[in-house]
Image (spheres, rainbow, N blue to C red):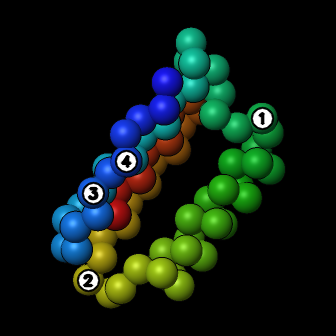
């Protein structure tokens, strides 16, 4: 079931979590995981201001982003 649209408010932190179904891995291969990490780092550099917070934690079955 799709979630509802979220309100975007400047200056408010967002916490994004993705979990694998039945603790299944979120990435098929280590190369997939590394590619995702590169995309997060690139977008952090190009789209977030210096005052933005960006933290991430990626395990085999859980992805957490805070920005």
Residue at 30% over, 70% down: 53
Q: For marks 4 and 1, give the CA distance.
A: 28 Å
Discs 3, 4 touching: Cβ within 8 Å: yes
Mark closest to the chain's N terminus, 2 or 3? 3
Quarter residue 39 falls in:
bottom right
Discs 3, 1 touching: Cβ within 8 Å: no
Discs 4, 1 touching: Cβ within 8 Å: no
Please tell me whether mark 3 sits on a helix, a strand or a loop: loop
Quarter residue 23 falls in:
top right
Judged from this view, the residue extending furthest toward the top is: 22
Q: Residues within 10 Å of mark 2 (few under 14, many from 20)?
A: few
Q: Which residue is mark 3?
A: 7
Quarter residue 67 falls in:
bottom left
Q: Which residue is mark 1?
A: 28
**Image height check: is 41 above or below 13?**
below
Residue at 41% over, 35% down: 3
Mark closest to the chain's N terminus, 2 or 4? 4
Q: Which residue is mark 2?
A: 51
Place of residue 59 in the rendered image (x, y in percent of width and height, measured from the top left): 53, 37
Q: Mark 2 or mark 3, which is nearer to you?
A: 3
Please tell me whether mark 1 sits on a helix, a strand or a loop: loop
**Image height check: is 31 above or below 40?**
above
Q: Nearer the viewer, residue 31 or 14?
A: 14
Q: Which residue is mark 4?
A: 5
Q: Mark 3 or mark 1, which is nearer to you?
A: 3
Q: Mark 2 or mark 4, which is nearer to you?
A: 4
Mark closest to the chain's N terminus, 2 or 1? 1
Place of residue 41 in the rendered image (x, y in percent of width and height, measured from the top left): 56, 71
Q: Mark 4 or mark 1, which is nearer to you?
A: 4
């Amino acid at each position: 079931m799709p979630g509802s649209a979220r309100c975007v408010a400047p200056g408010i932190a967002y916490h994004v979590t993705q979990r694998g179904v039945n603790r299944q891995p979120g990435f098929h291969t280590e190369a997939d995981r590394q590619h995702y990490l590169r995309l997060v780092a690139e977008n952090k550099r190009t789209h977030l201001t210096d005052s933005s917070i960006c933290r991430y934690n990626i395990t085999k079955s859980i992805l957490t982003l805070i920005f």
